Amino acid sequence: MAGVLGGPAALAAGSDGVGQTSPDDAGTLIRFLSLDEIWELAETQHPSMRDALRELAALERTLQQREAAYAPSVTLRSEGLGIRIDQNGSAQGVNPSLAVSSGLKLPAGVQLSATVTARDLTRIADGANSPLQATLSLSYPLGRSAELDSDALALREARLALEAAERRLEATRAQARMQVLSALRDREVAAVRWRLAQEGLADALRRWEIVQAQAAAGMATEAQVVTAELERLRAEQELAVAERNYHTREQQLLRLLGLAGSGEPYRFESVWDWTGMPPAPSRAESAERAVRYSADVWERAQALETARLQLQAERERAGLDTSLQVSYSNTTSQGQGQDQIGWRINFQVSYPLFDGGQRKLGIVNREEAVARAEEALAAAIEQVRTNVEELAFQLEDARRQVEMAQLDVMRAELELAALERQLALPVPAATEDAVASARRARERAEIAWREAVWTYQSRWVELQILQGAVDWDALKAGSD
């Protein structure tokens, strides 16, 4: 059957060309979209893709924020911009000061800081040297793992969250394609059903007019008149439903592609003949690939590793807190007017003698978090295997539905052939209306067969999405 391009009666096999426009019967320009253009719109305008891309952008900003913890910082601070009022009520100006401080934290755990302070800016304004104080310090925590630092753990979690979002984005992209493909098919089916409803109404109107003429001549019974009227009303109702369904399907497709509010008419490349049925993969191999690819399993595995790192960090914090600090200071003494230069090395040790059991409880909580993460990982793996098994069963059921639909098509073709032979007899044993009705029945059977094939394809695609890759060309195997 030819592919649907424009409307219910426009079942044209060809296309106008990629990205081109063509006029319809009323002279309105209609833009034609190829499948490549449709996929591009699906990957950027589909609602789920927009949400996924926004989430990805937010996580990228979060990662940049976490990385900034290891970026240099510079701060300018001014003090003393005001007045001091004595007890006797007299006001005096306060000597202003200006300080510039900078800091840098290295992934290895070393922290560097430097500060330069000008204590009296008024002396600079008078042309005198302002007393300056310069300090440089270096600190390093001893007995602590740099990768267990709070900033390092936060950076790790941000990177993992971004990678997980990128993994989910690939699955979302494939799902968006599948939804758009289904919407394209639904629109084409709705167009064919609309055309069949138009043909059915035309036949019903013709029979109704014949019965009305026979009734006027006294050759039709009242029951025949009522039956013809009932068939006409049913055909009108079927046409109204088919028309509404077509427009609904079309709007659904436009919404998925982000074109609903454009007001521009479109024509789409047909997928009517995408009837390939790729073979079902091995369940065991599919389950293993799905577990390896699953973003959920990967997240649970990383969450378990994070919980173990946090447990290790908690145990380190429960011990001695030691640090080494080396500083250099250059100050000018206001009383003597001499520079004082000196190095200082400090070694600090602290240990809480009593904390109400907080350290012990913290370790217990982290141990429980590790146990929960292990259970969550096992549950995620089991869920993926269950999903693969369920889709494999659904795929097999869909294949049986296709086989039954093929038999329905064969039966409809046999019935149509029999009626055509009866109509061709010297004394016809069938009417043209009966043959026309049989042709529509055969088309409906073929539509049902295509829908069964597409259901099989949908289950197959869902199974492939779990494994990380979809061969879309495999769905075209039945195309002419």
Image (spheres, helix red, strand yellow):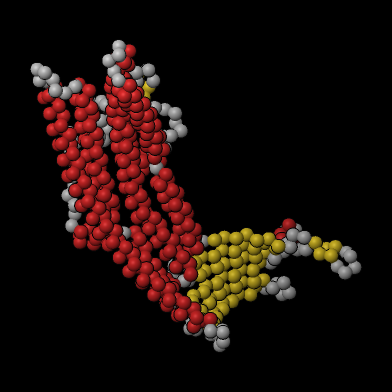
Query: Which residue is at a point 71% across and 75% down the rendered structure image?
Result: 336
- Above or below residue 157? Residue 165 is above
Q: Position of residue 297 (x, y in %)?
A: 33, 63
Q: Position of residue 396 (x, y in %)?
A: 20, 52
Q: Position of residue 50 (x, y in %)?
A: 42, 45
The residue most toward the bottom is 353
In-image side of 263 versus 375 (left or right): right
Query: Which residue is at a point 49% across and 78% down the rendered structure image?
Result: 362
In terms of depth relative to the viewer, which is nearer, 145 or 468? 468
- Above or below residue 349? Residue 54 is above
Examine the rendering and report whether any part of residue 80 can be seen: yes
Examine the rendering and report whether any part of residue 464 can be seen: no
In terms of depth relative to the viewer, which is nearer, 312 or 346? 312
Q: Position of residue 371 (x, y in %)?
A: 39, 75
In-image side of 305 versus 17 (left or right): right
Query: Which residue is at a point 24% across and 36% down the rendered structure image?
Result: 447
